[in-house]
Image: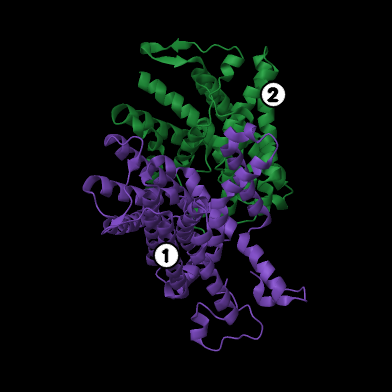
Chain colours: A purple, B green
């Protein structure tokens, strides 16, 4: 598949490499991007506290899903250890705060460092193993990380979890929901830009080649081992930072929050969003984060809502599994696939046929 | 002595569960991460049939086993059949999604409380004294015997049974098997139903022995390293792997730290993946295939 989708405007042709690399290509794209950013910036002015919290959760999920998409969707390395990496980041922040009272500008880079080191550990099996076996080895490492976290909690007497104070810089304390919204928005945007830049450069092309065919990639002169490890290191570092941000946002770290189900949720984000597309990672993050709330409000609309109140989480589980199955069977391209179909419908209107370049 | 008994019982549990992973992987190269949930479903079906045939435990068990066979076939026909030819990841994720769906459904139908199917069937579970003062509960003893019986039956079936030979053929080369007139869909459905059946037997016996909650899924997941350590496509390997994993787990819990319980199987798994990823008795080829 092509590194970048073909331009989606009639009469627009790229005539130079600079145009090919540009992030924003047409006026319509620039306009819609501007409107979207303005909407994001204006959102806290009209949103309720609950909606702000949801938005913050979406941003956190987006950082995690973007990093997983980088690894699985682009470099083609399957990982089932995402919750373990998030936990590693959260625990790095928590432990550093508890033990040496480190400020956030120490703990966040430390989390990234721990994530990068763990990325090497998680990535080493990928040099020998492929596909299923790699997924299993990352799954095993997830359990090891969770065990270490639990061990720390019990040995140090924080059996219910570690409490973290909100980050402070000088006299400013990051506690207000609006402030968190902008911080997390900035973090998510920075992650998106980092991923975009990685993918349109040499690294991204190397990853895509490895994903497409390892032997051919090697024959093209790509250092397989190096680029695979690099994918794991970058993805894990971002994930660990997301974990640390999550810890600060919640003000609380506990191994219970990082179950296998969290990994599955992140994998579901990139599946439901659409494999191999950063837009898919974002759409998936929104969908999976908001899904339980949709289910809950749908349940409340049913007659006799009180009866189901205790079983909302079970309904959530069942519905989530069902939606994942439906996407896997009927829409393997995910939400991005649906989005592209809508786009091409309007691009080609009044014709029905798809253009040759718009296959994906 | 008690330690040995514990190891044997745990190994029997892991082996009985692990053969389900092996059956499906060997025949269709799919890793079934919903095996723990299917096993739990089997145990809950015993709970359901127990209230249906309250006075007749044998009827209840037979009905539950029959149901689990049907569930296995349904899983293949409704879900996994659609996943043939997709990416490895997609098929595995389909099983993961199935697992989540089942977990939710089980809680919705039977609630999340701990249940005791043994009490409903009015079966007692007295401990048996063994040589050297070791104790084993009745159901644990039955479980060890059942595991031996299931493995013996599977060996004979795979070696001499007409359908067993077909299963092996489908596992070796689906294309050639299909060309020789073997109905692949029937074979895969058979593998799924057998795997669900053995898993359900394990689930029922564990539930009879120590009660039934959603946490049973974790036992199912912990049995997976046993299957991989032995080699994902080898039944003998599953037995050996179960012994190794169970031995390591019981000894480390006893001598080092009880908290290790959930992580030991996966440590063994990592060690195995580093040294010999295809397992003790597994075939090597598909790891090297490009």
Q: Residue at the location (59% across, 56% down)?
A: A272
- Residue labelled with disc 1: A186
User: Which image quadrant is residue A235 in?
Assistant: bottom left
**Same subunit under labels 2 and 1?**
no
Closest to the observer, B249 or B284: B249
Is label 2 in contact with label 1 (beta carbons under 8 Å)? no
Query: In the image, A93: left or right of B53?
Result: left
A331 lies above or below A144: below
A279 lies above or below B3: below
Q: Residues within 10 Å of mark 1 (few under 14, many from 20)?
A: few
Tag 1 secondary structure: helix
User: Which image quadrant is residue A351 in?
Assistant: bottom right
Q: Which dot, 2 or 1, sits closer to the camera?
A: 1
- Residue labelled with disc 2: B63
User: Which image quadrant is residue A14 in?
Assistant: bottom right
Q: Quadrant of the N terminus of chain B?
A: top left
Is any part of residue A221 visible from this angle? no
Distance in Å between CA atoms under marks 2 and 1: 58 Å
- The subunit letter for the residue under badge 1 reads A
Tag 2 secondary structure: helix
List x then y, in percent, for residue A352.
77, 73
Is any part of residue B140 visible from this angle? yes
List x then y, in percent, for residue B87.
59, 56
Closest to the observer, B129 or B124: B124
Query: In the image, A156: left or right of A332?
Result: left
Give the number of the disc on residue A31. Answer: none
Q: Residue at the location (45% across, 24% down)?
A: B9
List x then y, in percent, for residue B258.
34, 29
List x then y, in percent, for residue B66.
69, 28
- The subunit letter for the residue under badge 2 reads B
Q: Residues within 10 Å of mark 2 (few under 14, many from 20)?
A: some
């Amino acid at each position: 598949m092509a590194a970048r989708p073909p331009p989606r405007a009639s009469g627009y042709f790229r005539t130079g490499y600079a145009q090919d690399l540009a992030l924003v290509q047409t006026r319509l794209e620039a306009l819609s991007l501007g409107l979207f950013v303005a909407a994001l910036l204006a959102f806290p002015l009209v949103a309720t506290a609950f909606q702000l919290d949801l938005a913050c959760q979406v941003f956190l999920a987006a950082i995690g899903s973007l990093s997983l998409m980088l690894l699985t969707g682009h470099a083609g390395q399957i990982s089932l250890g995402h919750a373990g990496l998030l936990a590693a980041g959260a625990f790095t922040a928590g432990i550093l705060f508890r033990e040496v009272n480190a400020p956030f500008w120490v703990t966040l880079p430390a989390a990234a460092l721990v994530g990068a080191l763990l990325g090497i550990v998680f990535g080493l099996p990928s040099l020998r193993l492929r596909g299923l076996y790699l997924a299993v080895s990352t799954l095993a490492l997830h359990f090891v990380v969770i065990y270490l976290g639990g061990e720390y909690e019990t040995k140090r007497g924080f059996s219910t979890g570690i409490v973290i104070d909100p980050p402070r810089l000088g006299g400013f304390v990051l506690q207000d929901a609006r402030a968190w919204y902008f911080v997390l928005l900035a973090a998510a945007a920075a992650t998106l830009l980092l991923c975009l830049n990685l993918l349109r450069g040499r690294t991204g092309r190397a990853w895509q080649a490895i994903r497409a065919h390892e032997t051919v990639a090697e024959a093209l002169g790509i250092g397989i081992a190096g680029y695979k490890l690099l994918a794991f290191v970058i993805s894990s570092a971002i994930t660990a930072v997301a974990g640390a941000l999550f810890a600060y946002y919640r003000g609380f770290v506990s191994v219970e929050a990082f179950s296998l189900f969290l990994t599955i949720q992140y994998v579901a984000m990139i599946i439901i969003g659409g494999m191999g597309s950063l837009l898919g990672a974002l759409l998936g993050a929104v969908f999976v984060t908001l899904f339980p709330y949709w289910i809950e409000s749908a349940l409340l609309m049913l007659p006799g809502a009180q009866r189901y109140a205790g079983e909302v989480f079970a309904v959530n589980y069942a519905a989530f599994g069902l939606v994942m199955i439906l996407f896997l069977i009927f829409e393997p391209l995910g939400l991005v696939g649906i989005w592209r179909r809508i786009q091409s419908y309007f691009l080609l209107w009044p014709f029905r046929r798809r253009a040759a370049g718009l296959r994906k | 002595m008690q330690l040995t008994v514990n190891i044997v019982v745990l190994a029997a549990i892991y082996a009985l569960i692990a053969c389900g992973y092996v059956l499906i992987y060997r025949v269709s190269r799919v890793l079934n991460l919903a095996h723990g949930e299917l096993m739990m479903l089997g145990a809950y079906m015993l709970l359901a049939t127990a209230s249906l045939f309250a006075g007749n435990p044998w009827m209840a068990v037979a009905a539950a086993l029959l149901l689990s066979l049907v569930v296995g076939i349904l899983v293949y026909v409704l879900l996994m059949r659609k996943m043939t030819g997709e990416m490895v990841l997609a098929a595995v994720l389909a099983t993961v999604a199935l697992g989540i769906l089942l977990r939710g459904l089980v809680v919705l139908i039977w609630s999340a409380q701990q249940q005791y199917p043994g009490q409903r069937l009015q079966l007692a579970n007295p401990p048996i004294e063994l040589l050297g003062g070791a104790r084993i509960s009745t159901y644990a003893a039955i479980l060890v015997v059942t595991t031996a019986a299931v493995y013996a039956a599977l060996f004979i079936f795979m070696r001499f049974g007409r359908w067993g030979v077909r299963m092996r053929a489908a596992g070796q080369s689906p294309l050639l098997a299909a060309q020789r007139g073997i109905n692949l869909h029937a074979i895969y459905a058979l593998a799924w139903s057998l795997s669900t059946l053995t898993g359900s037997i394990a689930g029922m016996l564990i539930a009879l022995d120590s009660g039934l909650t959603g946490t049973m899924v974790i036992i199912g997941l912990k049995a997976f390293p046993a299957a991989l350590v032995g080699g994902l496509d080898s039944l003998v390997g599953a037995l050996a792997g179960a012994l190794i994993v169970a031995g390591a787990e019981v000894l480390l819990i006893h001598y080092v730290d009880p908290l290790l319980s959930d992580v030991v199987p996966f440590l063994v798994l990592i060690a195995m993946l580093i040294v010999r990823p295809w397992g003790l008795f597994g075939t090597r080829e598909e790891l090297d295939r490009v």
